[in-house]
Image: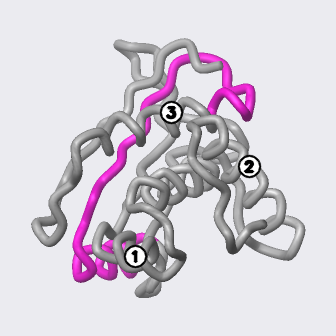
Amino acid sequence: MADKLRVVITDCQKEVKIPTGIRMLIRRCCHAILETEGFKGSAEIGVTFTDEREFKKLSLEYLGKESDDAVVSLPAGENGEYDVDRITGAKQLGSIIICVKKAVELSKAYDHTFQREMAYLTAHGVLGLLGYSYDGAMGRVSMREKEEWALHQLGLPASSSYI
């Protein structure tokens, strides 16, 4: 498990009021993924909440395409190698960008809570920072299992789309 985890959450959108407890849930979800993955050492993760316009702009800037997804991972490392903060010694894992309005839409479409959707998107994002991807059938299955396991650890119900 990570020795110490710092999750820096920034809300850059005004469309959706972030309910009390979401920030703590996101931090707990980051911990759950790193623990499940056996991550060692201290780490730092950035999580930014955006609106759709900014999300598409950031997707274009960093991925070279406008994304209609709800989450994008911007890893700061590669193959398990990360920059290390000289002061704290924490590995800089990267940033997760979440389109909050899209998260609301997805929670309604999949008939589950906004909290569950935000936790799922966070789990997906952290796995992306660790090098996982949905490329290929096996990659998708592996990631979905890890995402659902983390949500189970947090006491959140399994998605009907996964069962």
> In the image, 89: left or right of 123?
left
The alpha-carbon separation of the residues under discs 2 and 1 comes to 24 Å
Question: Which residue lies at the image location 46% right of the left edge and 86% below the top edge?
Answer: 65
| Residue at screen point 36% across, 43% down | 46
Q: Is residue 123 above or below residue 12?
A: above
Q: Is residue 110 left or right of residue 21?
A: right
The location of residue 6, given as percent across then percent down, is: 39, 26
Residue flagged by tag 2: what amino acid is it? Lys
Task: Name the residue tied to disc 1.
Answer: 59
Extent of the magenta region: 34-62
Within 10 angstroms of label 2, few (less than 14), some, or many (20 or more) residues? some
In this rendering, the label closer to the viewer, 2 or 1: 2
Q: Where's the C terminus, which quadrant?
A: bottom right
Does 146 sit left or right of 71 as displayed?
right
Q: Secondary structure at mark 3?
A: strand
Q: Position of 12 compared to 28: left or right?
A: left
**Residue 91 at x, y percent in the picture:** 51, 27
**Residue position marked by numbered label 2 in the rendering:** 146
Q: Which mark is residue 83?
A: 3
Query: Closer to the N terminus: mark 2 or mark 3?
Result: 3
Hey, what amino acid is under mark 1?
Ser
Residue 161 position in % (x across, y down) = 69, 74
Asked whether 43 falls inside the magenta stretch, the response is yes
* Helix, strand or loop under label 1: helix
Q: Residue at x 21, y 54 (%)?
A: 18
Viewer-proximal residue among 91 and 133 = 133
Q: Nearer the viewer, residue 24 or 155?
A: 155
